[in-house]
Amino acid sequence: MKSNHGAQRVKRSSIAVAINVAAVCSLASLPAAFAAEPIVIGGKIFTEGYVLGEIAAQTIESTTHTPVTRKLGMGSTGILFEALKSGAIDVYPDYTGTLAEAILKRPDLKSLDDIRAALSGMGLTISGSLGFNDTYALAVKAGFADAHALKTIGDLIPIQGSVRAAFSYEFIDRKDGYPGLVDSYHLNFDPQKVNRMEHSLSFQALDQNAVDLIDVYSTDAKIKKFDLRLLEDDHNYFPVYQAVWVARKSFVEQHPREWQALLGLEGRITAEAMLDMNAQADIQKISFEKIASQFLGSAAPDSESMLNKILRRTREHLWLVGLSLLFSVLVGIPLGVAAVRFQTAGQAILLSSALIQTVPSLALLCFLIPVFGVGTKPALAALCLYSLLPVVLNTFTGIRGVSPSHLENARAFGLTRRQVLFRVVLPLASPTLLAGIKTATIVSIGTATLAALVGAGGYGAPIVSGLSLNDVPTILTGAIPAALMALVAYGVFELLERLLVPAGLRRRP
Amino acid sequence: MLELQNIYKSYEGKPVLSDVNLVVPKGATHALIGSSGSGKTTLLRITLGLIPFDKGYVKINGQALLSFTPLEWANRIGYVPQDGGLFPHLTGKSNVSLIARLRGWGSSQIDDRVEELRKVVDLDAGILGHFPSEMSGGQRQRVAIMRAAMMDPAVMLLDEPMAALDPLIRRSLQQELKSIFQRLGKTVLLVTHDLGEAVFLAEQMTMLHEGAVVQSGTYGDLLLRPANGFVTQFINAQRSLPDATVVQ
């Protein structure tokens, strides 16, 4: 079956696809973890990941009063797993089937104990099942089930010649999906009536009676929304995807109270409850905090006010943009100067910084994960690389634009090379140079929203979670401040230009 | 005293200057004249120490260029580039004092020297606070002369000091320059293609043609005893406009 079960549920946006890529290419482990205080809860980038992550966070907060940092919506299995090993997060929810296949590469491991024993070798452990199995299932409309007395998958056999099905591409193509299913149940559907369809569209098709049967995930909120009936897998064909908490063993040893609090949730989240919570998030657009607190029967935690949230994200975003800018200035300007001075190396410098710019940002993040792990580091590295080109190129162009006669005059006056550079060349190039830094800043403010995909926070966090929920207002709480920040940055640079660009070089009205 | 002795320079195997000799006695103003391509710009750059040469000596007060570091040489020769060559990002005063600041002069020492020179070139004090783009051509030229004289060099070198000015300003600045040179009391070499300028400002002149000295002497020498036909040709080409009788 699929290797990253959870992320499949995300709207099949390019982001989700890229994150899967990122998961696959995340390889190396990080250097030693930092002692985690507060406790950091991770979560995958799909509704259930957010809900379970929030439940874990609130459980720890309410039972142990230990502070908790939420890093939800971090991507899929590969990223979360790297983050866990490196200590960037302490606990996150995952599924036994995913752990066995994607992490352990041992699809034969079925039982919780076997999987726990195998993970132990990697310094990790898992809780018992939280109470539900999130796996593939076949679904029909309630009316259709009643009309044909359908309870189990086997009940389809009498009507197999006339059933119209719509299955997702993965389900149809994987040997452990559709082909294995028909073998196991000796089903014989009419191939003419089995359609391959984008998963999110198959619900619509079923709802409009264009098809009778689709594949779903057993806790998908849309089951409730479209009033579907799941057919029981009485052959136990589908693999088991029990939801569990995953943690480092060292964390469990150092934080026994917190871990006990999480173990208290074992068996408490039924498939019904999970489906219900997913529906509240996806359909009723209730906040994850509220859903989790309702489930836990506690008052909603001191949920951060919108203002505080935006302020915190502003800090995170500014940190990312500011640091990467500092880097691009400290490295980019010398590189630009070097590019002017050394012809061949100069072309190489310009070409390589241009090449970096052509790497799609998600792919770049993916390349950087094996080196930097997850969190702020890879995001910063990516931003640094992206802001390099405008600075290098404008430094180069600005210096090349300085009249050679000024350079010769400066030498005739006895200025050293260094003095020529700092007293004449850079000041004369400063308008172009500053324009490059301005471009880098604005681009970086936009690009930094992608940092949320690797858990670095910032304005990207609500954008990523809003995208996964198809929730435009949430997206806007990230997108609007980001746009405002870009405007403010523009204004700041206008001011800087007045301060830094020598008055004799400024545009005159 | 500025001496250029037996200067040879070739570029990619092609001789640009051959056996050029030129002497400017202490306190005198001398013009190096020639049309474009005569080699005068190359000679100027050699004198400034900006480019190497194949043979010969450049000396100031008997000491050869090659015995100095570029910085030491720059202190001995004040350069006024064409059109002033002021740095556009610096005010007049910053242009004038740039080198002194880099050499670690104190601000009062700088202020005193700037004020002294300002009087010599007869410039309004307010102009020194302006950027070059805010100055007239004549003001720029004066500021450039102040800058060249700032470190009190033995020799001043001016490249086409009038070329970029309009005719009326030229006439008045010519008068000014002459008295400025007198007040500065420096050894001055000015490089120009304009015979009128050379005649007006300099007592002696050296005419350069195709990389060699054609004739050295006063204007009278060149006019009355031309070394060859080129000298006469050059002088005639720069004669003033036709007089009224021709127009009528």
Image (cartoon, coloured by chain):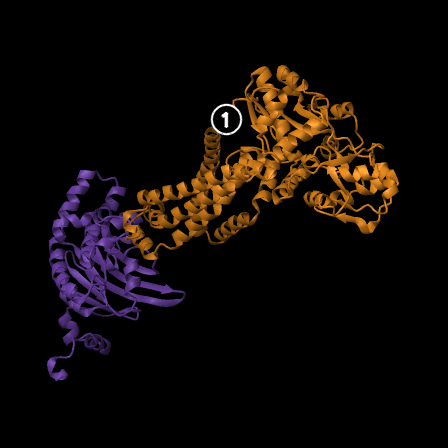
Chain colours: A orange, B purple
Q: In which quarter of the image is residue A245?
A: top right
Measured as percent of width and height from the top left, residue B59 is found at 25, 55
- The residue lying at 19 percent from left, 65 percent from top is B166
Quadrant including the N terminus of chain B? bottom left
When the figure is inspected, residue B78 is found, relative to residue A54, above or below; the finding is below
Under tag 1, what secondary structure?
loop
Left or right, residue A106 beside residue A488: right
Type of the residue with mark 1: Glu
**Nearer the observer, A432 or A126:** A126
Residue A413 in the image: state x and y as whole percent: 27, 50
Q: Mark 1 points at which residue?
A: A304
The image position of residue A508, as x and y in percent, is: 28, 53
Image quadrant holding the C terminus of chain B, namely bottom left
Asked if one can make out residue A381 in the rendered structure from this viewpoint, the answer is no
As drawn, is B59 to the left or to the right of A69? left
User: In this view of the protein, which residue sits in the foreground, A502 or A379?
Assistant: A379
Chain bearing mark 1: A
Considering only vertical position in the picture, is B23 above or below A59?
Answer: below
Residue situated in front as seen by the camera: A68 or B134: A68
The residue that appears at 16% across and 63% down in the rendered structure is B169
Determine if residue B23 is in view.
yes
When the figure is inspected, residue B148 is found, relative to residue B221, above or below; the finding is: above
Residue A198's spot in the image, x, y percent?
70, 46
Picture layout, residue A425 above or below residue B245: above
Specify whether A113 is left or right of A305: right
Q: How many labels does the image show?
A: 1
Horizontal side, residue A201 vs residue B78: left or right: right
Question: Considering depth in this image, is A379 or A273 the residue closer to the camera?
Answer: A273
